[in-house]
Image (cartoon, grey):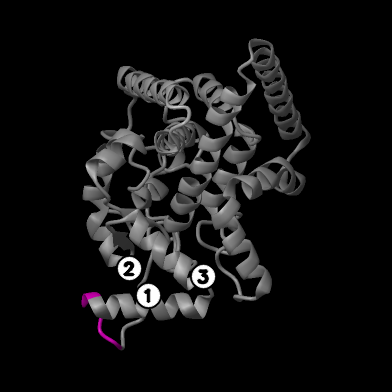
Amino acid sequence: MSETTARLSRDQLQSLIYYRNGYTLAKLALFVAIMAALSWLSWRAEGNPWIEWACYLGLGYMWMSLVTFMHEATHYTLFPKKWQNWLYGVVSMLPVMITFVAFKEDHMEHHKYNRSYRDPDSFTMGKRGFLDFLTYYAYIAISIVLTMIHFTIIYPIKAFTPKLWAIHLGEIALKLLCYWALISWARHAGLIEDVLEVWLWPIAAFSLFNSMRFIVEHYETPWDQGKLAGTRTLTSNPVHSFFWNNINYHAGHHLYPKVPYFNLQKLYEMVKPDIAACGGVVDKSYVAVFAKAVVRGPESEARCEKFLKERSEKRGAASASASVYPAAPAVLSPIPGQLAAGGEG
């Protein structure tokens, strides 16, 4: 992988890195209020499956809003203090058997080895054998189940130190205690069915949204060509960007993960020339890219190169004889230390 220099100066980058606690707390309160309203409506609409399932779908979508905030917390960009980010991360992950510490550690590796065979999230790339197809489509269908297995068992066994194991097991114990308390209360109140419906069905809907987001962010982007080239930007629409906290402006986030969610659109405008120069991928629609990924199936390096070349030729971005992988950065940032770091700082 070749390196190049980013256009952003230290001052430009510093101007994007700050906290907006009031705004973040207001958004969080709005998201929780919407979820409470949808839960109430689903209960009131009992017997009307159209309204009930619309509410479950909406709740699943809103869970992704909370999870994208959790993603910010892994980079310590949600709140000023590390403990505040940890508190939000642990609490926001209580409804599912996935620990914040496991997600955080995996995610830091994903940033470090983005779109390469050392990336723990790069399972979409392989030889297109039977197991590749099985894993790929199983993830699309039941991503939450496979994700729980990965983060609860597989990744910790591969990567955790004794300290991380202690945190991980502590989080699991907290989850089990909360589940026991909630289910006991619901049974005593005669609400067990209602509680399980607004807990489990929205998680199933969230699973679909999560598999779509996860695959679309890197599918058929240049392989092993650095942070910017190997990450897709989705311009989407303002409403979706608001609710998913600009995670769709993902290439800039991989380049400068210390830039908080509310400045990712500004960052995109600033690095847009670099995205074009390194062969980065920009699309409009999550649904369109995801539909293509469902049809095409798991990746191989040869197929990825073929489709990227076709894309380049179609858009007139390069001549037919040009390399499908233009020079792209492993690390585009000239900024040392925590400004360009993925996690600690």
Identify the mark at residue 308; answer none if there is no mark: 1
* Residue 201 among those drawn in magenta: no
For badge 1, the amino acid type reads Leu
The image quadrant of residue 176 is top right
Instruction: Quadrant for residue 103, please give it.
Output: top right
Assess whether mark 2 and mark 1 are in contact (beta carbons under 8 angstroms).
yes
Whole-percent x and y of residue 257?
A: 41, 42
Q: Nearer the viewer, residue 267 or 283?
A: 283
Residue linked to disc 2: 279
Report if residue 4 is visible in the image.
no
Instruction: Give the amino acid at mark 2.
Output: Gly
Q: Is residue 260 above or below residue 274?
A: above
Q: CA distance from mark 3 to mark 1?
A: 15 Å
Picture mark count: 3
Q: Earlier in the sequence, mark 3 or mark 2?
A: 2
Q: Which residue is mark 3?
A: 297
Q: Nearer the viewer, mark 3 or mark 1?
A: 3
Judge from the rendering whether residue 288 lies leftward or rightward of residue 117; answer left or right. Answer: left
The answer to whether residue 146 is left or right of residue 40 is: right
Question: Secondary structure beneath disc 3?
Answer: loop
Residue 198 in sight: yes
Residue 78: mark in rendering: none
Identify the residue at horizontal 35%, vertical 19% (top origin). 21
Q: Position of residue 183 (x, y in %)?
A: 68, 20
- The x and y percentages for residue 303 are 48, 79
Q: Residues within 10 Å of mark 3 (few under 14, many from 20)?
A: some
Q: Which residue is farthest front?
A: 47
Which of pointers 3 and 1 lies earlier in the amino acid sequence?
Answer: 3
